[in-house]
Every structure is written in C-alpha cells, then in structure tokens.
Amino acid sequence: SKQHGECYVGGRPLPPGPPWPRLPLLGNLLYRCPTTASLVDALRRLHADYGPVVTLWTGGKPAIFIAGRDAAHRTLARDGATFAHRPPSWSFGFNAHGVNSAQYGGRWSLLRRNISSHLAGAPLAGALQYSVGKLVSSLECAAAAAKNHVVVPSEMLRHAVVSFFASLCFGEGVEEDVLRQLRGVHAEILSLVVELGAFHLMPALLEVACYFPRCRKLSNVQKRHRATVMTLISARQQRDSDGVGSGRRRCYVDTLLELRLGDEEMVSLCWEFMNAAAKITSTALEWIMARLVLHQDIQRKLQKDIRGGEVDGNCTADGERRSPFLDAVVLEALRRHPPAHYLLAHTTDKDVYLDGYVIPKGSVVNYGVADIGRDATSWTNPVEFLPERFLEGGEGYGVSVTAGSGSGEESMKMMPFGSGRRACPGATVALTVLKSFVEKLVTRFEWTPVGAVDMEEKPGLVTEMRTPLRTCLVVRPHVQPTN
Ligand code: HEM
C-alpha cells in the first residue's frame, strides 16, 4: 500500500496519506481542500487509495480521518477517555464557553451533566404539540394559497423546530418577533464562521488572517446576539424573583442561573443549545420528508402503520403511540443522510498506537460519519433507502445510534450522533422531536413530488439538501383542518 513514509513518532509511522507537498506553515490539507465541500471529495478518494485511516496535515499538525467502523470503535468507544479531548479553540468569542468546546475535565463534566439531565427531565409533550400544531397551520395556509398546493416547506420546518428548542431553552412564550430576531443573528453569525476553522483544519495563522477582516462585523452581531439573549435571561430571572415561576416548567436558562454562571458563559451556552439543536434537527427533518416524498410507497406504509397504532391503541408506558415503522424511517434517514458528515474535532492526550500506526498526541482526529453509515461491509445496498432494515430481524435491528463503550464494534454501524464520551447529549430528544414532527406531518398531509426530487447534498458544517424540497401538500381527507 502507498505510504507517506517520512513521519514517525516513537518508531511508528503515522497513518498513510498523500504525498502532496507539505508546506512549512500550511501543511497539505488546505492546498487540496480549501473548502468543506472539496474536503469531502478529497477524503473519499484518499480513503479509496489509502484505507480507512488517513493523515493530512494542517499547519504542523496531523489531521487524522477515520472512516472505518472498527477503528472508530477502538478509538471512540474502547479508548473513550483518551479520545474525549478537543483541540484548543480560538472560537473568536461566539462559542468560547460551550460544552462542545470545553476541555475534557471538571467544567465540561459539570456542564454536560447539566444539559443531559435537563434534556432527560424536560417535559417535551406540551412544547412539541404547540410547535407542531403551529407548523401544521402554517403549512395548511401556505398550501391553500399556493398554485396547485406546491410549497417549499424548509423555512416553515426550520421555524417550528427553532420555536420548539427556544421553549426548552428560554421557557415557553418567547414572542414571535424575538424568535425571528434570534434566528436573524444566528444566521448572521453562522455566515461569518470559517467552516474549516470550526473543524480545526485551518492553520492558526490563516485562521487569524481569515477572521481579521470579519472582526468588526462579528463583534457587532455578537453584541446584538448578547443583548437579545440577555433580555430573555433577565425576564426569566425577574419571574424567579417575583415568585411568578414557582411550579412552572424549568427551562435550560433556569439551570444555568442555578449554576450561578457568568453572563458570558450563559450567553455562550444558550448559543450552543439553540445552534447545536435547531439547525441540525431541522435539516434531518427535511431529509426525512424528502425521502417520504420520493418514495410514495414508504409514505403510504408509514401512514398506515401510524394509523394502525392509533386504532390498536399500541402505546408505550407513557402513552406515546408506538409505530415501529416510524422509528425505522427516522433511523434509516439518519444512516443515509446524517446531517453531520463529520464529528466535532477530537484530539488525544497521548500517542495512541492503532494497527501498526501512531496517532500522535495532539493530532486533530475526526470521523467519516456518512462513510460509516454507508459502509457496504455493514449494510446491504447501502445507498438505497430501506427502512425495513431496522425492523425486527433486519440487519439494523437493535443498532445503537450512539454506540457506547460496552457495545461491540457491530453496533458502530452508524454514528449520526457520534459515539463515546463526547457523543451528542441531545440524541434522545432529537429522535423524539423527529418522530413527533414526522408523525403529524404524514398523518395530516399527503406529500407528493413536483418533478424530480433532488437528493444532492450541500456539504458544510451541517450537510443540507442542495435544492430545498418542493412538494405538493394536500390535507388528507379523514382529518379536519385546523383553523
Ligand atoms: C438530529 C439532531 C442532532 C444530530 C445529528 C447531532 C449530532 C451531533 C454530533 C455528531 C456531535 C459531535 C459528537 C462528537 O464530537 O463526538 C454533537 C455534539 C453535541 N450536540 Fe448534537 N446533534 C443533534 C441534536 C442535538 C440537540 C437537540 C442538542 C441539544 C439540545 C445537541 C447538543 C449537542 C452538544 C451540547 C454537543 C457537544 C457534546 C460534547 O462535546 O460533550 N445536539 N451532536
């Protein structure tokens, strides 16, 4: 096999990589992959040439990409503590105090336990019903007003998901105009983020050079973000001191206030909560709906399965209806279209030996989430959309979405939420949200295609649909339209 033979640590070579010239301050990654989109293509070719673990260089640092289920399991799950570190971050102020950017240690552990227990205990049903209900009404209006009922629902889907997470974060009753303001500043901040920098794949010198001309804009929009979020936090604090809040549902901000964090920390954690949750979950939702538009047979089967559950009264202990096919559709969509094609950057606190190679301490380590979910050694016809594989007896039945340290590498067949200690703390809530939204959208409307459905991807920090979904929406005859 080809090998980039010059680099050894402790007598072992680094994982193989291309013999592209490695420039002193730049490395070799940027020169072939100046954008996230080109990185995805370059990595696909490199994995085909060099195998599931490859090395590129970002500045003087190795960036190691793992696209095999076995190597992913041995690092993230079996050697979890070693791989739970994050590279030190510049962050330019907007994400300085997040859980994701926290160094593996006491503060991370405290904040992570806080978000996890908030999400585990949050009563979701009321907020879900409200957001889904509003979404259904706006879709009904849009379809009624549109020629031939043709709508592009992405914006409405996004807004509903944001409004749901806003109520989890800031409490119920965030005004529509505040929500829009918040979405506006979020979008502005995201448009100023240098994506390769966010993946820690940009040499420090270049990252500074990229951010320098954006500095003023960024600091400006951050001030507006801070002002909006602080108003929401103060309102919550005020209600507490007025005693209005007793007995009400706790929101994420309440937990941050109880931890007595500083304003900067709270603003940063709210940014992370909204940002980690809303865009990625609504992107997943759009992929699912696109698949249901594309495969009318699957949509019909799903609708029947959900209605069957209603008729049989097939419920879980907490009264939720159970539709195994709905679970299967959501899992298959996350396997085939994971909204995060890579994890956030990991690093190690020591040299790690893997298959005769070394992953040196301090390297950037990342994982090909989409490659792992589409691996032909794990899945039959991996590019096909076949929810049935997740039903009892299928090859995906029982596969965990965040394979933990106790499970075998078999269960690493997909990792849309990452795996190990840094795995997404929002996975369970995200699955609940996706299922509730899809259930309501499919029982309320018939979703049919308008021309060809373009399933091409637009790679980025979150991989969205290149062309937003267009669909003809008709209210199903057996349900009463809302007013
Ligand atoms: C479909 C929806 C979602 C997907 C696909 C997703 C995926 C991910 C992925 C891939 C990571 C990186 C894991 C790693 O670096 O190893 C992550 C981290 C994280 N996610 Fe999610 N996520 C989703 C929803 C959510 C939600 C709803 C929340 C919170 C409300 C959330 C909060 C976080 C946080 C705080 C981290 C950082 C964890 C840490 O560094 O310890 N995510 N997520």
Image (tube, rainbow, N blue to C red):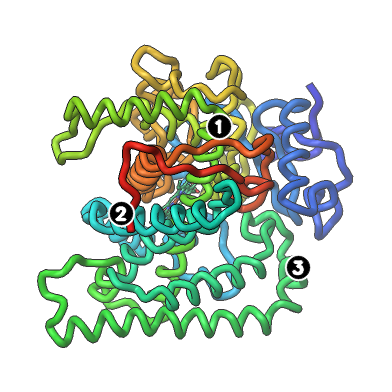
Q: Are there few (<14), some (14-19), or many (20+) residues within 10 Å of tag 2?
A: many
Q: Residue at x 57, y 64 (%)?
A: 89
Q: Indicate which disc residue 336 carries.
A: 1
Q: CA distance from mark 2 to mark 3?
A: 45 Å
Residue occupying the far right of the picture: 21
Eyeballing the image, is 329 above or below 82?
above
Report the Cα–Cα distance between label 1 and label 2.
Answer: 25 Å
The quadrant the C terminus occupies is: bottom left
SS under mark 1 = helix
Quarter of image, res 112? bottom left
**Three-letter code for the amino acid on which mark 2 is drawn:** Leu
Q: Look at discs 1 and 3 and give the one toward the viewer.
A: 1
Say if mark 1 contacts mark 3, CB within 8 Å.
no
> Which residue is drawn at the image coordinates 50% and 38% (left, top)?
447
Q: Which mark is residue 202?
A: none
Q: Is there any visible trace of residue 361 in the rendered image?
A: no
View extreme (top): residue? 393
Q: Relative to 352, is 136 above or below?
A: below
- In the picture, measured across the screen, residue 192 lies left or right of residue 30, that is left
Q: Amino acid at mark 1?
A: Arg
Mark 1 within 8 Å of ligand 1, using the beta carbon: no
Q: Which residue is pictured at 61% across the width and 31% down the height?
A: 371
Residue at image x 57%, y 43%? 471
x and y, in percent, of residue 203 in the image: 74, 60
Name the residue tied to disc 2: 128
What's the residue type where badge 3 is placed?
Answer: Leu
Residue 453: give x, y in percent of width and height. 65, 36
Is 461 left, or right, of 236 in this rendering? right
State which tag comes first along the sequence, 1 or 3: 3
Q: Nearer the viewer, residue 483 or 258?
A: 483
